[in-house]
């Protein structure tokens, strides 16, 4: 049978101690299972709700194949480990391969692609309001009296909205370029707080 184990360890451990403990626990699972499919250490994460008055924990996912009698043994052994604050073993029909962690180069490429997409959308949005405002101006000159005042106010309001959108887009572009440069510095190891 296919199983998936997720366990959370106490945040009182240092990163090195947590990794050592993960290896020990995974050895227990290896001894009782026929095959380990995946071991994925998620690191220290915030808990959805406090457990034993703790706000954070080290998460670990293990996918493996084992018999039902072995699952009971694994469960009993995990309950005896003080560092584990919560664990869950679930039977799976199919063990889906988990996506590998992205490399830094893949992350940078993805960030650049996202930035280009946002820039293209911002350019398309800034061009569209200008065209709408240009088409409204001739209508304004054709009308007279009360309608003329209402249309003028409406056109002014649309122009104001278009200008505020343009300002926000420019700020977003500046923020994105700042973020991009900060990411580059972090990847190069240049920023120290």
Image: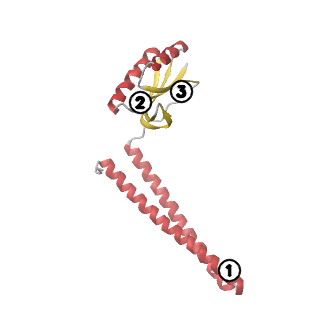
Q: Nearer the viewer, residue 106 or 164?
A: 164
- Please report whichever mark, 2 or 3, sits nearer to the chain's N-terminal start: 2
Residue 10 tag number: 2
Nearer the observer: mark 3 or 1; the answer is: 1
Q: CA distance from mark 1 to mark 2?
A: 66 Å
Q: Which residue is mark 1?
A: 150
Between residue 185 and residue 76, name the one nearer to us: 76
Query: Residue at horizontal 34%, vertical 32%?
Result: 14
Q: Report if the CB atoms under discs 2 and 3 are less than 8 Å apart.
A: no
Q: To which quarter of the image does residue 155 belong?
A: bottom right
- Answer yes or no: is residue 144 visible: no
Within 10 Å of the Cα at label 3, are there few (<14), some (14-19), or many (20+) other Cα atoms?
some
Residue 8 in the image, given as x and y percentages of width and height: 45, 29
Q: Is residue 97 visible?
A: yes
Classify mark 2: residues with Cα within 10 Å, few (<14), some (14-19) or many (20+): many
First in sequence: mark 3 vs mark 1:
3
């Amino acid at each position: 049978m296919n199983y998936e184990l997720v366990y959370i360890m106490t945040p009182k451990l240092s990163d090195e101690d947590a990794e050592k403990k993960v290896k020990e626990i995974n050895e227990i699972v290896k001894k009782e299972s026929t095959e380990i499919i995946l071991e994925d250490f998620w690191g220290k994460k915030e808990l959805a709700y406090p457990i034993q008055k703790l706000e954070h924990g080290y998460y670990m996912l293990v996918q493996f194949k084992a018999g039902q009698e072995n699952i009971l043994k694994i469960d009993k052994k995990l309950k005896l480990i003080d560092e584990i604050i919560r664990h869950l073993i679930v039977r799976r029909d199919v063990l889906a391969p988990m996506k590998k962690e992205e490399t830094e180069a893949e992350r940078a490429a993805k960030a650049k692609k996202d930035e280009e997409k946002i820039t293209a959308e911002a350019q398309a949005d800034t061009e569209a309001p200008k065209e709408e405002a240009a088409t409204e101006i001739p209508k304004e000159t054709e009308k007279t009296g009360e309608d003329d005042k209402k249309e003028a106010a409406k056109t002014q309001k649309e122009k104001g909205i278009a200008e505020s959108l343009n300002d926000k887009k420019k700020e977003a572009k500046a923020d994105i370029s700042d973020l991009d440069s900060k990411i580059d510095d972090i990847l190069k190891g240049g920023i120290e707080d």
